[in-house]
Image (spheres, rainbow, N blue to C red):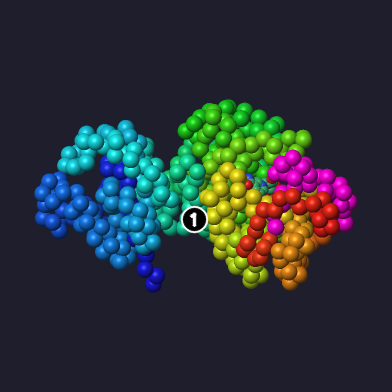
Amino acid sequence: MKAEKNIVITGFMGSGKTTVGEALSRKLKREFVDMDAEIERRAGMSIPEIFRRQGEAAFRDKERKLAYELALRHGLVIATGGGALVDGELRDMMAQHGALICLQASPADIRARLEESDGRPLAANWERLYHARQTAYAQIPRQVITTGKTPQVIAAEIAALCADALFVKAPDGGGYPIHIKRGILAGLGLDAQAYGLQGPVVLVTNETIAPLYGESLARALPQASLIRVPDGEAHKNLDTVRQVYDDLLSLGADRGTTLIALGGGVIGDMAGFVAASYMRGIPLAQIPTTLLSMVDSSVGGKTGVDLPQGKNLIGAFKQPRRVIIDPDVLNSLPQSEWRCGMAEVIKHGLIGRPSLLDETLWKLERAEELIQQAVQVKIDVVEVDPFETGIRAHLNLGHTFGHAIEKVTGYAVPHGEAVAIGIVKAARLSRNLGLIGDALLGEIQTIFWKIGLPTDIAIDAERCYAAMATDKKWKAGLSRLIVLKGVGEAAIVEGVSREEILAVL
Ligand SMILES: NC(=O)c1ccc[n+]([C@@H]2O[C@H](COP(=O)([O-])OP(=O)(O)OC[C@H]3O[C@@H](n4cnc5c(N)ncnc54)[C@H](O)[C@@H]3O)[C@@H](O)[C@H]2O)c1
C-alpha cells in the first residue's frame, strides 16, 4: 500500500489550526499531532515558560527538530505553530514530505480568538507580526479561507484539496484547486460543502448541456438554479451576457451567490465574464465539459466575449474558486469536438510535456491521465505569467496561423482543425528558420494524421497573411510568432519577414 503523505496545516496564530486539524484527523481517521502541544509535553513546561526561561531561539530549535522528525513519518495530520513555516527552508522541507495547507483567517476573527485565549507569548504585537508573516504564508500554494466556515467545512475542504486536486497559484497570492476525477459530478450534490458549492449557486449552461448534465446537477446541489443560453460561438456575445445578467437579477443573485459555468469554452468564457462583472464580481466555479475547455480554457482566468469586429475583444481576468473536471462527460462529446481538444493537447505536449505525444494516452479510457498531464502544462505557464506578458504566449503555438485560417474561410474550418494546421505551419517555419529538423516536422504531421486532424489547407496566402497581420500580439506591424526549438521547447520570435511567412502559407 502506498504510504499516505502527511497533511500539514499552518497559518497565523488564532487561525484555527488545532481545531481544524482535530476535525480533519477525525474525518480522515488519521493520527493528529499538534506541534506546540508536543513541544510542551516533551519540555515538561508551557510555551510561555520555554520563551521565558530559554528564549525564542531555543523554542524555534525544538520546533525545527520536531518538524524534521515528523516529516519522516506518514499519514499524520499535523498542526504547526504559527511561526514554524515562516522559515523558507523548513517550509520547503515540509512541502516535500506532505501536503501543506495554509489557513487564512481575517484579522477580525484572529482578534476575537486572541481575546478569548491567553498563553500566547507573541500575541501582544500580533498585528505587526500578522503583516510581517503574510509574505511567507503566501508562498504556500494551498490556501484555505476560513471566514464564515465551521471547522468541519474547512476540514472537508482540505480533504478534497488533498484527495484529488491539482492546484493553481493565483496572482493575488491565493489559488484554486482543479479536481479531476471520473464520476465526480454524480457525487457533487452530497459533497457540495467540500467543493464550496453549498449554495446559493446558479448554473449557467447551454441548451445542449442542460438536459445532459445541467438539470440533474441543479436538482442535486442545494439552493441551485439553472440559466440556459443558446449553444454556439455565435452566442458568445454581449446579448447573451445581458440575458444572463437579467436572469441573475430575477433570481435574486447577489455577491454571496456562486456562478457555475457548466459547458465548453464558449460557456466558460461568457459565464466567466458575467461572474467577473455582475455586481463587480461574484465567485465562479468552472465545470468544463469539452476536452478543450478541460485542458485549456477553464484554467488561467481568461474570460470574455466576441464583438462583431473580432473574437474575445471584451473580457476580464477572473480566477475561478475551483475547477471540477469529470472525464465521464466526454462520453457524450461528439468525436469532432474530441479531435479539436486533442489539437490543444498536442500543443501542450509540444511546448511542455512530451509524454502527451504518446498515442497510447489519446483514448477516452485514459482521459483522466491525459487531462491531468495536459492541464499541468497550462498550470505551469499561467502560474509564471498570469497576465500574459511573457511565456504565456507559448500557448499560442499555431494559433496566429490558425485564427487567420478561421477568418479567411469564414469560420468554415473548426477551431481545432485550424489549430492543427497552424501548428504544422509554425513547425514548418521553425524548420525554415533552422530551429528544428525535417524529422520533427514530419513527426508532428504524423501525430495529427493519426488523430484525424488535417495538416494543410489550400488557401489564399496573401489574404491569410493580411489576417495574421491584424493579430493583437503583433506590434506596429512587426510579426510575433511562436516557434519550436525542439519537443518541449517553444520560443517567441519577432520580426519574421513577410516572405518567410508567405513561404509556409
Ligand atoms: N479562456 C481561454 O483561455 C480560452 C482558451 C481556449 C479557447 N477558448 C475559447 O473556447 C471556445 C471554444 O470552446 P469549445 O471548443 O469547448 O467549444 P464549445 O463550448 O462551443 O463546445 C463545443 C460543442 O460541444 C457541446 N458540448 C460541450 N460539452 C459537451 C458534452 N460533454 N457532451 C456533448 N456535447 C457537449 C457544446 O454544446 C458545443 O455545441 C472559443 O470561444 C475559444 O475562444 C478560451
| Vertical relation: 481 (above or below) 365 | above
- 128 in the magenta segment: no
Query: What quarter of the picture does the N terminus occupy?
Result: bottom left
Within 10 Å of disc 1 (Cα), the crowding (few <14, some 14-19, many 20+) is some
Residue at position x 67%, y 53% in the image: 492
Residue 109 locus on image (x, y percent) = 31, 35
- Out of 325 and 349, give the one closest to the viewer: 349
Question: Can residue 221 be spotted in the picture?
Answer: no
Residue 248 locus on image (x, y percent) = 58, 31
Quadrant of residue 163 within the rendered picture: bottom left
Q: Which residues are magenta?
A: 457-483
- Out of 471 and 112, give the one closest to the viewer: 471
| Vertical relation: 457 (above or below) 441 | above
Amino acid carrying mark 1 in the image: Leu
Count of marks overlaid on the render: 1
Residue at position x 75%, y 61% in the image: 433
Residue at position x 54%, y 28% in the image: 279
Query: What quarter of the picture does the C terminus occupy?
Result: bottom right
* Side of 190 relative to 456 (left or right): left
* Side of 166 relative to 299 (left or right): left
Residue at position x 45%, y 43% in the image: 173
Q: Which residue is mark 1?
A: 166
Residue 277 locus on image (x, y percent) = 58, 32
| Vertical relation: 490 (above or below) 148 | below
Residue 310 locus on image (x, y percent) = 75, 38
* Side of 32 relative to 269 (left or right): left
Element assignment for label 1:
strand
- Out of 365 and 122, give the one closest to the viewer: 122
- 479 in the magenta segment: yes
* Side of 389 relative to 55 (left or right): right
Question: Can residue 82 be spotted in the picture?
Answer: yes
Quadrant of residue 387 within the rendered picture: top right
